[in-house]
Amino acid sequence: QVSLVESGGGSVQAGGSLTISCEASGDAASADYLAWFRQGSGKAREGVAAVWTTADRTYYADSVEGRFTISRDNAKNTVHLQMNDLIPEDTATYYCAAAQVPVMTARQALSENPYNHWGQGIQVVVSS
């Protein structure tokens, strides 16, 4: 049974912070890459942040670099996304994803195609 379950979404004022989490189980718990994607209303889904679990290397989209931090809690098979200095453009449904690909480039790590396990998504709303 493969499962990715997101938690921690909600509403926040612009400039505020929010942390969302994703608990992985089954095959997803041993993924090579864990990532967060988001999809705003009327927009395509985009990669936000990813972590290569083998090397503990992280990757970020330019739009969130310096504001968002992805981290793992190995003991709990959980990946977090800490979001600071939120802006209304960060409003979206955020998805956790897992990939079993040994090595990817940074561009691949933030692309949907390599990821074969997805969570249901969680809503984040940033108001101005």
Image (cartoon, rainbow, N blue to C red):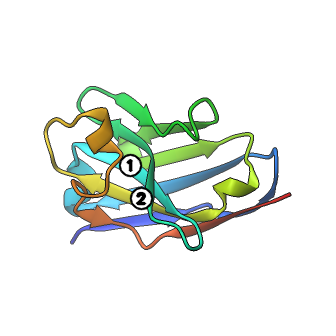
Instruction: Pick whichever, 75 or 105, lies toward us.
Output: 105
Task: Identify the residue position indicated by label 1 in the image.
Answer: 35
Residue 30, percent across and down?
A: 21, 48
Q: Earlier in the sequence, mark 1 or mark 2?
A: 1
Q: Quadrant of the N terminus?
A: bottom left
Q: Which residue was labeled with disc 2? A: 96
Q: Is residue 88 left or right of residue 100?
A: right
Which quarter of the rendering shows the C terminus? bottom right
Q: Name the residue located 49 percent from the left edge and 64 percent from the top edge.
A: 6
Looking at the rendered structure, the kind of residue marked 2 is Cys
Task: State the residue in front, 17 or 113.
Answer: 113
Residue 111: image x %, image y %? Answer: 32, 50
Residue type for callout 1: Ala
Is residue 3 something that shows in the picture?
yes
Q: Residue furthest left?
A: 102
Determine contact: label 1, label 2, CB under 8 Å: yes
Figure quadrant of residue 12:
bottom right
Element type at marker 1?
Answer: strand
Near mark 1 (Cα within 10 A), the count class, few <14, some 14-19 or many ≥20, is many
Q: Quadrant of residue 92?
A: bottom right
Question: Residue at the location (19% across, 59% down)?
Answer: 27
Q: Residues within 10 Å of mark 2 (few under 14, many from 20)?
A: many
Cα separation between marks 1 and 2: 6 Å
Q: Residue at x 60, y 43 (%)?
A: 82
